[in-house]
Image: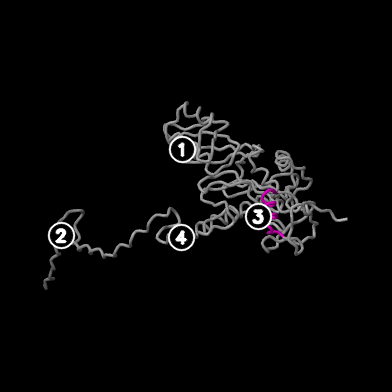
Amino acid sequence: MMMSEKLQKVLARAGLGSRREMESLISEGRVSVDGKVATLGDRVAGNAVIRIDGHAISAKPAEDVICRVLAYHKPEGEMCTRKDPEGRPTVFERLPRIQDARWIAVGRLDVNTSGLLLFTTDGELANRLMHPRHEVDREYAVRVFGEVTDAMLSRLRNGVQLEDGPAKFDVVTRSGGEGLNCWFNVTLKEGRNREVRRLWETQEVQVSRLIRVRYGDIKLEKSIPRGGWMELPLEKVNYLRQLVGLAPESRSKVLVDDKRSQFKQVAQIRRAVRKHRERQHTENRQAHPERTAEGYQPIAPAKPVTKKPSRPKTPRTRLGTSEARAPRPTQRKSRG
């Protein structure tokens, strides 16, 4: 007998939104199963044809989906969308291609923010990790410009009022820097839009660098270059699933003891990073043809070629003196 699941659960696992959002779609009559408009409470089998607004979706049974998680080192300048209308690079462009599934971003980072960004093939896991009720720690390294006093740090720990409600840092620690450019490590349990930057702005200081270094217990490994990624082993995948109350996964694409698999992953990361650099280089040259590849310095106009005047010939001198050698007189032989 074929197993069935609640329709909203199947849609959430496909990465189309949270269960509550999928329930709203079903209530609005926008979802159909095998040609019939679905209603709340419907259950579907693995071979059901599901459509949203007339478009068929890929919804595999739970037992056929392997929960995979990537840790991606996002560079500054990339958008957290699948496609950008302005043609800017996106975080999805360098992820490994997979069949019968798609990568779903766990939250997002601002275009000017870099660091750790998680992706998963399990939409339910992504939605639960993003939900505020699970209170997953997010740690950032922040460089701020401006004088920061202990009173400011105290206010940031106790909480301040933002446009969309109160907010605070759970932890704020100094981590280096001198003068008006100082580094701090901050931790919070929410992921509201530009929340870290807005918190600092309430104290009239500006964030000049922002890097996410940790999500829960998953840290940004130094071995992952900017624009590179690493697939998490089963142990770390199940840590994230346990964190949000999901059953553990029993399968993984990562073979921990297989050196060949590890080398293959490293090679994929290097290819992705190299491809991105080549694309950026090409785009920069197309956008700025007047610049050079080495330092993008403006090319100076060519100087006109002028012929140097020839040196006047001077008579040969005798042993370094400036006097010209006198011509030798001719002698006639006398006839005797």
Q: Mark 4 or 2 closer to N-term?
A: 4
Cα separation, mark 4 vs mark 2, equals 62 Å
Q: Position of residue 214 (x, y in %)?
A: 61, 39
The residue under label 3 is 96
Query: Which kind of residue does numbered mark 1 sit on?
Result: Glu
Alpha carbon separation for disc pair 3 and 2: 84 Å
- What is the crowding at mark 1: few (fewer than 14 residues within 10 Å), some, or many (at least 20)? some
Q: Disc 3 vs disc 2: which is toward the camera?
A: 3
First along the sequence among labels 4 and 3: 3
Residue 240: x and y, percent?
70, 41
- From mark 1 to mark 4, how far is it between C-alphas? 36 Å
- Relative image position of residue 312 (x, y in whole percent): 19, 63
Query: Nearest the camera: 7 or 245?
Result: 7
The residue pinned by badge 4 equals 285
**Range of the magenta residues?**
19-31
Q: Which residue corresponds to the image point at 16% horizontal and 55% vertical from the top-left?
A: 322
Callout 4: SS: helix
Disc 1: which residue? 201
Residue labelled with disc 2: 324
Please identify the dominant SS of the magenta region: helix
